[in-house]
Image: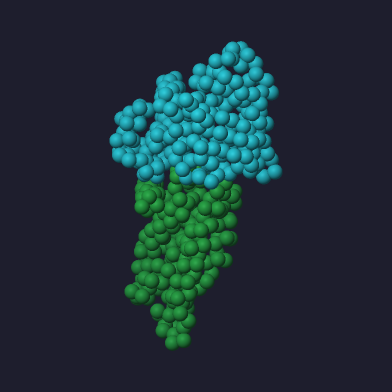
């Protein structure tokens, strides 16, 4: 019970701080929209190549925007010495990880809710209901790894450089799965591998590993 | 009868290859106030960080209220209140929200009442609904003091708590230290102000090069001899 109470307390605090400072959401949202607009103008979109280009553009926007936000998750708190204050409390480190992860999912989710209709309009694609589980699973995979590594990168001087270098190689499987699964919604492929299954497996493995290792990452 | 509330035995801590604490021994008994003096880099802050559970020691033992800090960390953490020389508060939260957040983290019962009482105690009640970013340096330090007292810790660790406090703030700090020991708690604080160390403590220790170079009862000290030893330590 205390675990849940503490998780919700940290989540509440992060949401309240973000709603007042508006630093992360605004930046992430603007970045995602700009990426979609640039991709839209950069490619010569036709009916026959839309399914090959649009999913990639969507996930590049989501992943890069997510990394912008993930980088701030723990860095801002660490820079101000506030992470130490949190670590002083008798709180299970898994609760801190879970709260940060939920906060990240919420922040990224808001950006995605704004970006998806823009994507649909710019790339002239319908928004399928089946896109929801793909977006959820893809975002969870990126956020699970990003939250863990943002804690690791926050302790270094080159945190802005280090975070993408650490995160990108690890999220390749889930991003490929998300891009392919999104593409399959546009052009049905009869022999497509079970991308959703791959994403679920990825999320379970990395979420568990991140929960278990966060304590060691956050320690001085 | 008082008993050792904090026991530090041969405590060692390195940062990389550099030893910062080289086997510190210290005992703080219930109802005692101990001041730690020392030059910059003597290891005072590192010692308090280890005691607060923020840094892991490389050797030795720390027992807080009979609990081994390394093996029973969450329980030991519950017994400690820590005030650093920087207030470290959430600027985007209000003064009251800062306290309520930490009250939830410590599982404080009747947290609204407790937070209100502490804000009144540190003279910030009228500013409870203002953003913490609007507070001055000294007021932020008072808020940090209130936060450290939220869960009624038995051991209060203070790292240069007098930094940035005005005269009234210093008097408040002294009163809170007195209350803490009167209620059976213990206090360990660092300061660069010898006068504060002499005024607020029952015992004074002097850290030099990561070792406890000197440890005396405050009442046995003449101000002039204390000043002499302190000046020597700073060399």
Residue A4 shows in the view: yes
Total marks placed: 0
- Quadrant location, the C terminus of chain B: top right
Q: Position of residue B101 (x, y in %)?
A: 37, 43
Q: Is residue A10 left or right of residue B211?
A: left
The residue sitting at 65% across, 18% down in the picture is B229
Q: Position of residue B81 (x, y in %)?
A: 46, 35
Q: Is residue B16 left or right of residue B27?
A: right
**Image quadrant in which you'd find residue B90:** top left
Q: Nearer the viewer, residue B46 or A64?
A: B46
Q: Position of residue B91 (x, y in %)?
A: 41, 40
The residue sitting at 46% across, 86% down in the picture is A191
Q: Position of residue A203 (x, y in %)?
A: 47, 67
**Image quadrant in which you'd find residue B113:** top left
The residue sitting at 58% across, 56% down in the picture is A162
Relative vertical location of residue B82 with respect to residue A183 in this rendering, above or below: above
* Colour setting: by chain
The residue sitting at 33% across, 35% down in the picture is B114
The residue lying furthest to the bottom in this view is: A190
Tint applied to chain A in the drawing? green
Residue A42 shows in the view: no
Q: Nearer the viewer, residue B136 or A14?
A: A14
Chain in cyan? Answer: B
């Amino acid at each position: 019970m205390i675990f849940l109470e503490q998780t919700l307390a940290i989540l509440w605090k992060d949401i309240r701080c973000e709603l007042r400072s508006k630093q992360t959401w605004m930046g992430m949202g603007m970045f995602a929209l700009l990426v979609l607009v640039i991709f839209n103008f950069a490619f010569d979109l036709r009916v026959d190549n839309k399914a090959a280009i649009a999913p990639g553009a969507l996930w590049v926007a989501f992943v890069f925007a997510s990394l912008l936000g993930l980088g701030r998750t723990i860095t801002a708190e660490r820079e101000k010495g506030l992470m130490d204050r949190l670590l002083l409390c008798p709180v299970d480190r898994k609760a801190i990880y879970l709260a940060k992860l939920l906060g990240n999912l919420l922040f990224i989710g808001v950006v995605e809710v704004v970006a998806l209709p823009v994507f649909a309009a710019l790339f002239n694609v319908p928004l399928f209901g089946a896109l929801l589980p793909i977006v959820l699973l893809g975002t969870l995979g990126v956020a699970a790894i990003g939250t863990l590594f943002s804690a690791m990168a926050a302790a270094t001087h080159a945190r802005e450089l280090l975070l993408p270098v650490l995160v990108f190689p690890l999220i390749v499987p889930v991003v490929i799965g998300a891009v392919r699964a999104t593409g399959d919604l546009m052009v049905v492929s009869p022999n497509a591998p079970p991308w959703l299954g791959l994403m679920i497996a990825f999320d379970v493995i990395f979420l568990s590993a991140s929960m278990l290792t966060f304590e060691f990452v956050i320690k001085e | 009868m008082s008993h050792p509330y904090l026991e530090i035995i041969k405590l060692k801590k390195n940062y990389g290859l550099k030893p910062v604490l080289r086997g510190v021994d210290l005992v703080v008994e219930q109802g005692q106030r101990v001041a730690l003096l020392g030059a910059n880099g003597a290891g005072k802050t590192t010692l308090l960080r280890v005691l607060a559970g923020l840094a892991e020691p490389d050797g030795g033992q720390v027992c807080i209220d009979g609990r081994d800090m390394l093996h029973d960390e969450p329980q030991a953490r519950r017994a400690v209140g820590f005030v650093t020389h920087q207030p470290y508060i959430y600027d985007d939260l209000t003064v009251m929200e800062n306290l309520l957040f930490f009250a939830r983290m410590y599982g404080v019962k009747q947290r609204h009442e407790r937070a209100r009482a502490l804000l009144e105690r540190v003279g910030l009640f009228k500013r409870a609904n203002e953003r913490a970013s609007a507070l001055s340096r000294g007021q932020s330090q008072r808020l940090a003091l209130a936060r450290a007292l939220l869960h009624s810790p038995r051991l209060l660790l203070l790292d240069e708590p007098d930094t940035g406090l005005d005269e009234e703030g210093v008097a408040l700090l002294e009163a809170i230290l007195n209350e803490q020991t009167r209620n059976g708690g213990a206090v360990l604080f660092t300061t660069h102000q010898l006068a504060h160390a002499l005024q607020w403590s029952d015992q004074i220790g002097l850290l030099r090069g990561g070792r406890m170079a000197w440890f005396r009862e405050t009442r046995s000290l003449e101000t002039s001899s204390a000043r002499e030893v302190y000046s020597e330590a700073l060399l």
